[in-house]
Amino acid sequence: MSTLSAATLAAQAAKAAKAVAHLSTEQKNYVLQSMANAIRSATPAILTANSAELEQAKANNTSAAMLDRLTLTPERIESMAQAIEQIIQLPDPVGSKRFIEERPNGIRIEKRRIPLGVICMIYEARPNVTADAGALCFKSGNAVILRCGREAIQTSLAIANAMHQALAEHQLPQEVVTIVPDPDRQLMLDLIQQDQFIDLVIPRGGEGLIRFVTDNSRVPVIQHFKGVCHLYVDQSADLNMALELLLNGKVQRPGVCNALECLLVNQHQAADFLPMVAEAFRAHQVKVHACERSISHFDGAEPIAAADYGQEYLAPEIAIRVVDDLDAAMAHIDQFGSYHTEVICTQDQASADTFINQVDAAVVMHNASSRFSDGGELGLGAEIGISTSKLHAYGPMGLEALTTERFVVSGQGQTR
């Protein structure tokens, strides 16, 4: 596909964005309910497309983490529909106002939220992103261009077709939710040059994809390179609680970006806590990469060099390090963290406050699982992505992150 085709596609999305930007909240919610209903009705077609792509992915020796993200079931499709219905219940950020001040000359200054315009989502084997991104961008008054990887393109097209039916039912252009049918990399490169029409690019996928988009885009990019999440078990931690946080963060769904990838244990807790961890990890078949101070507690653990931390395993696999104290734990996170999510387990509020104030991450948890670092769990509804860069948005991104504010100045004829 040529550069002209990419420009045309982007221009059509920009035109469609004007059709949704000024819809009322009630109108948008009616359309969203139609989208949820259409996805439910399309379940057989979506599963048929997904089954074929899963077989191809397995034949290509796709990783377990990628397969998990690609796989849809009737339950996961129902969850997609329910996520759209949750978005219906969320406050509409578009048009919300906040008063700034009245100046001495009598002019009144406020800020009002408006849509960004056109969002370009670039993602790999994550077909649920098609529904989540389409619904979030629509509710926030934007059009979206969805560029899915070849591993999930047919599944994503089936989901988008259902959403297009809902748009047509309400006399809205299908380009409000544009699915790019060709996963060609050159087309993706052409798309991210279209800064005249596209306002924001959000890549979701492996680090290589995100770095490629960041390095080549002329459009602003939301960055989230990887999720290297740590749990630090402090000197005053409740060890039973710490074990629950560890297992939930590592074992429940290891192939996601908010899963734990490293356990840090205060030296005063190591003798009591690490045998508990070893027993639990044996039961769950978790592979361990252990430091010199922890390896004796694990059968079959691999030694890890200090420079080899910071890996995103996305598997039942974890690094473990015994640290001297809270400062050493924070120093480790500062060196190896990815600004995603960091967790402290402690009964000492002073330690928790120090960790929260000093650790550099989009989400910081105190005695709560890293798995809560998710738009839905944090009350945002389905998330559009997670930003680990600090401009515009930081952390899980919901509706408000897909809008911006502009100044509105009201006067009675004042001149400067």
Image: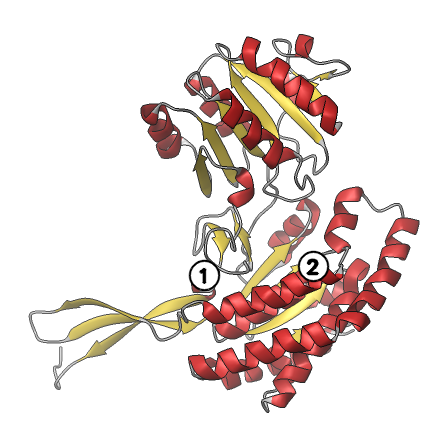
Nearer to us in this view, 45 or 189: 45
Residue at figure coordinates x 67%, y 10% from the top left:
297
Q: CA distance from mark 1 to mark 2?
A: 25 Å
Q: In which quadrant of the rendered view does residue 283 lie?
A: top right
Q: Position of residue 341 (x, y in %)?
A: 51, 39
Nearer to us in this view, 316 or 123: 316
Q: Secondary structure at mark 1?
A: helix
Q: In which quadrant of the rendered view does residue 273 lie?
A: top right
Q: Are marks 1 and 2 in contact (CB under 8 Å)?
A: no
- Please tell me the numbered disc located at residue 401: 1
Q: Position of residue 31 (x, y in %)?
A: 56, 81
The answer, for residue 179, to whether it is visible in the render is no
Q: Is residue 236 left or right of residue 148?
A: left
- Which residue type carries mark 1? Ala
Q: Which residue is mark 2?
A: 76
**Colour treatment of the image:** secondary structure
Q: Is residue 106 left or right of residue 350?
A: left
- Which residue type carries mark 2? Arg
Residue at figure coordinates x 56%, y 60% from the top left:
384
Residue projecting furthest to the bottom: 171
Query: In the figure, 205 relative to 133: above or below?
Result: above
Q: Position of residue 131 (x, y in %)?
A: 64, 67
- Please tell me the numbered disc located at residue 59: none
